[in-house]
Amino acid sequence: MTRIKRGYIARRRRTKLHLFSSSFQGAHSRLTRTMTQQRIRALGSARRDRGKRKRDFRRLWITRINVVIHETEVFYSYNRFIHNLYKKQLLLNRKIHAQIALLNRSCLYTISNEIKK
């Protein structure tokens, strides 16, 4: 009987898995079963945190706009400012408003004066 050598498919799969988890610590980068478990965990965390990153940035932008609004007393509250923006159909997103609030406050004053009219 001749010797049968195993195929390369499982080895290729494990090599790909090892390349993914090579930066993990300890057995998480050495043992196949724990590498697989850590890969599932890492990909799940990445998916969850992509949504969390969007929420965090939105909170940051809202906070920045709110601080400038309260400092300048343009409006009493953030939600009234946004409501009046929508009423006047000056549709700029919160990211742009936060950049304007940080870098060019005079532009924010002109926007707010336009809203008040």
Image (tube, rainbow, N blue to C red):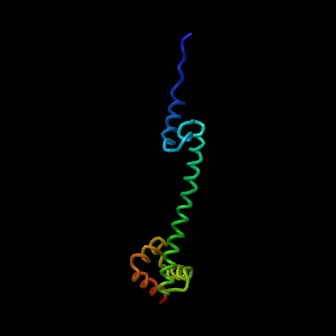
Vertical order, 55 against 105 (above or below): above
> Which of the image's four quarters has the N terminus?
top right
Q: Going 44% across and 83% down the picture, which residue do you hit?
A: 111
Q: Position of residue 37 (x, y in %)?
A: 60, 42
Task: Identify the residue at horizontal 53%, vertical 20% (top origin).
Answer: 5
Direction top: furthest residue: 1
Residue sticking out furthest to the bottom: 117
Specify the quadrant of the image occupied by residue 59. bottom right
Q: Examine the rendered structure and indicate whether residue 3 appears above or below residue 72.
A: above
Residue 101 image-quadrant placement: bottom left
Looking at the rendered structure, the number of numbered marks drawn on it comes to 0
Residue 109 location (% of width, % of height) = 43, 84
Query: In percent of the image, x 49 and y 82: which residue is there?
Result: 69
Give percent across and percent down for residue 39. 56, 44
Q: Vertically, is 29 above or below 53? A: above
Give 51 or 42, whichever is nearer the viewer. Answer: 42
Outermost residue, front side: 26
68 relative to 6, above or below: below
